[in-house]
Image (tube, rainbow, N blue to C red):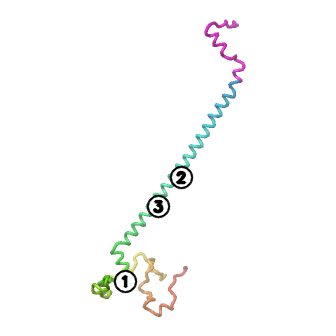
């Protein structure tokens, strides 16, 4: 069989005395190994949870960026609309549609109470020979018998104007079926 181990000499003997025997060493390592395994497992679970939280934040960030882009596009479209309606020719056209006329020569009061300038009354220029956009037929409107008003809200040429026709004030406005 095997022969017994020869007694150790010198340095090997001193190291053997410092090392504990093989029996109790296995039992003493068990709690340490469990502690290391638990720490590693807890660290892994913590990393997974942290990674999940970061991914969730990343998805939320991309969603907010998309919303910001959409709102920026909408703001720019509204700003273009305001700019187009603020142009002098657009303001003049809208003022004429509302019945406004250009003012006459202005007069100014000086601090001493004297009038500077010769004020004149504003008069409406003669109507232009070109047809107005509200009187022109709408190419997108249907020629059906519904008799409804145009989508722009202007009164059609066949309906009486309540401001000029006293009989039109007492009659109810035309309605289309189903409204």
Q: Position of residue 57 (x, y in %)?
A: 54, 49
- Report, in whole angstroms, how far the alpha carbon at label 1 lies from the one at label 3: 36 Å
Q: Residues within 10 Å of mark 3 (few under 14, many from 20)?
A: few
Q: Is residue 157 magenta?
A: no
**Front residue of 146 and 117:** 117
Q: Which residue is mark 3?
A: 71
- Dividing the picture into quadrants, the one containing residue 12 is top right
Q: Which residue is mark 1?
A: 100
Q: Which residue is mark 2?
A: 60
**Front residue of 143 and 147:** 147
Left or right of 34 on screen, residue 143: left
Q: Position of residue 48 (x, y in %)?
A: 59, 41
Residue 145, above or below 40:
below
Which residues lie in the magenta part? 1-27
Q: Position of residue 53 (x, y in %)?
A: 57, 46
Residue at image position (57%, 45%) is: 52
- Report, in whole angstroms, how far the alpha carbon at label 1 lies from the one at label 2: 52 Å
**Residue placed farthest to the front in the image?**
112
């Amino acid at each position: 069989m095997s022969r017994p181990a020869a007694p150790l000499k010198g340095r090997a003997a001193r190291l053997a005395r410092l090392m504990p025997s093989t029996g109790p060493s296995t039992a003493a390592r068990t709690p340490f190994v469990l502690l290391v395994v638990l720490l590693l497992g807890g660290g892994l679970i913590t990393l997974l949870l942290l990674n999940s939280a970061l991914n969730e934040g990343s998805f939320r960030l991309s969603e907010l960026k998309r919303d910001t882009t959409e709102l920026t596009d909408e703001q720019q479209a509204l700003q273009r609309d305001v700019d187009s309606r603020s142009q002098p020719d657009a303001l003049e056209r809208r003022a004429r549609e509302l019945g406004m006329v250009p003012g006459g020569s202005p007069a100014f009061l000086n601090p001493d109470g004297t009038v500077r300038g010769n004020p004149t009354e504003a008069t409406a220029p003669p109507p232009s020979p070109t047809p107005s956009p509200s009187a022109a037929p709408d190419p997108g409107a249907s020629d059906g018998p519904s008799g409804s008003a145009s989508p722009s809200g202007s009164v059609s040429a066949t309906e009486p104007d309540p401001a000029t026709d006293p009989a039109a004030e007492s009659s109810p406005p035309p309605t289309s079926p189903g409204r």
